[in-house]
Image: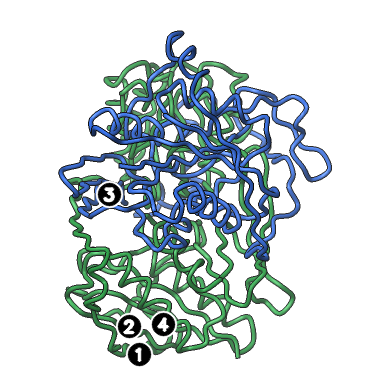
Chain colours: A blue, B green
Amino acid sequence: MNIAVCLCQVPDSASVIGFADGALDRSRINEVINPYDEYALEEAVSLKERIAGSLVTVFTVAPLSAKDMLRKALALGADRAVLVSATEPSDPYLRALQLKSALMEFYEGIIPDLVFCGKSSTDFQSAQVPSMLGALLGIASVSGVTSLNLSGEHLHLEREIEGGVEQIELHYPVVISAEKGLNQPRKTTVKAVMEARKKPIDLLTVSVDVAPLVLMSDLKALERKKVCRFAEDEKDLVLLLSNEFPLFSGD
Amino acid sequence: MTKFLVFLEQREGVLKKSSIAAWNRVQEFAALSAGAIVTGLLVGPLDRQPIGDLLAGDGVVYHANAELLRPYQQESYTRIVASMITQESISALFFADSSLSRDLAPRLSVLLKASLLSGDLLFNRQGYPDGSFRPVYSGLATASFSPQRNISIYTLSPSRGMVTRSSADGTVQVMPTAQHHHSSDNLLAELRRIVLRQNSLDIAEAGIIVAGGRGMGSSAGFALLEELAALLGGAVGASRFAVDEGWRAHAEQIGQTGKTVAPQLYFACGVSGAPQHLAGIASAGIVVAINSDPDASIFQVADYGIVGDVHLVLPKLIEALKEFLKKK
């Protein structure tokens, strides 16, 4: 079984994230695997460990500096890694097209059985790439998966919906986007890091010549300051709220 | 002639409130922008209310009411919406942001080569929606997004302005549409079932949220928040820390790796106010913060605050509130 995992790099939320001239100030940021992608990778690797003869390949469309991230993914259990060179995509649609080209080229036109992505990236937060990739590949996609079980050719998935859970049963191939809660990602070990050095990283170049669907502009740091009025005590707070908030004084 | 289409979502035969709010919102700005026509598309059967009473303004709602369409089905839903857009020459499609639209809208975007936008709407001079504005980078920044194609798809986040109406002020005509299940849809054969949690108000739809963070100390600490929420008719939410510690379920998490909420009143109890958390409450109305640290960043986004230990403040607040409600 071929399992593909799409990874992306995002600024570590623990690093200093600043903005200058409508762009991210990259001088002081540290890039890490997108948090949701860690759940995607973990699920792929744990499936591989249960199904004999399956191969996990990770893909990223990124500059060469993303090799470190790919090494980490290999240490976390992926078998192969593919670093895809392409022009920086300006919207999720172009990103999905680039990933589709990379998958089709790497797998020589045969759609992998399972494609895992993170639910969204923490930088642009559009949460569109996984479903777009499914549509482009012409296969089903399920977004925000919190539970996955495989029996034969059937997948039993769960995703959170408003006020409950949706249970889905379907055949692969399918694109699955991983939500927090799907699993507990493992940590790397020294031994795994050493072994990862021997695993291959393939280089691939794709070019997608399509106009974007959406353009992003006016990127700027968010200022949100209110003046907080401190209540003298709890009774005072209830009074203050009752003046402002109709539900307190009305019905 | 500009034509807007609003996707009306039913779940288990009941029209979702967020869809009604989206329809009414679109009607509002369609009335301001000269001559826009609002059409609705409801997929799946309804068990109860005639929907004309819930929807404001004038318009036609096409109803694909086949029983097979009761559960969400990715392929048939995609096909029905796409063919309606082509057939009616729609220029903008609106969804209420939901787990369904997050699954469906990106696929429609690819199929129709339509610009998919989310967040707060931006309008052009004629009063037509022309882009969106939303947080990026874990809520540390904002950006504008503009459509580059002829068809746009908007997913509307819950916002305070989105209210449901008790009585309609126009005539909404419901027309059955001949959109049936295709046998070819079984290509991606999928079975879906819904298991709803009992007696729980979802934070994404709650008007009042009482949220707790690290300062609550344990899962037992949330009992105070449960009590306050019950008193106010609200829902309990949690910060990432509280969820990671296993004190609360992920469904209750607010912020970057959780949900975006827009209650009229938000209590942040023992929540420090990390940017990732604040990203989830950017559209909240009145924010009340209770925290023992007077320098906690949550106070910078709060309208009202009390500095103090939540374990001491909350019982007193609950008492004060009970007193207040009794007097009325």
Amino acid residing under circle 4: Ser
Q: Would you say the residues marked 2 and 4 are in contact, meaning their CB atoms lie under 8 Å apart?
A: no
The residue tagged 2 is: B52
Amino acid type, label 3: Gly
Q: Residues within 10 Å of mark 3 (few under 14, many from 20)?
A: some
Q: Quadrant of residue B71?
A: bottom left
- Mark carried by residue B83: 4
Circle 4 chain: B
Measured in 3D between alpha carbons, the distance from the residue under mark 3 to the one under mark 2, in whole angstroms, is 26 Å
Judged by depth in the image, the label closer to the viewer, 3 or 2, is: 3
Outermost residue, right direction?
Answer: A21
Q: CA distance from mark 1 to mark 3?
A: 30 Å
Label 2 resides on the chain identified as B
Q: What amino acid is found at the position of numbered circle 1 in the picture?
A: Gln
Q: Are marks 1 and 3 in contact (CB under 8 Å)?
A: no
* Mark 1, residue position: B173
Q: Is residue B188 visible?
A: yes
First in sequence: mark 1 vs mark 2? 2
State the residue position of label 3.
A163
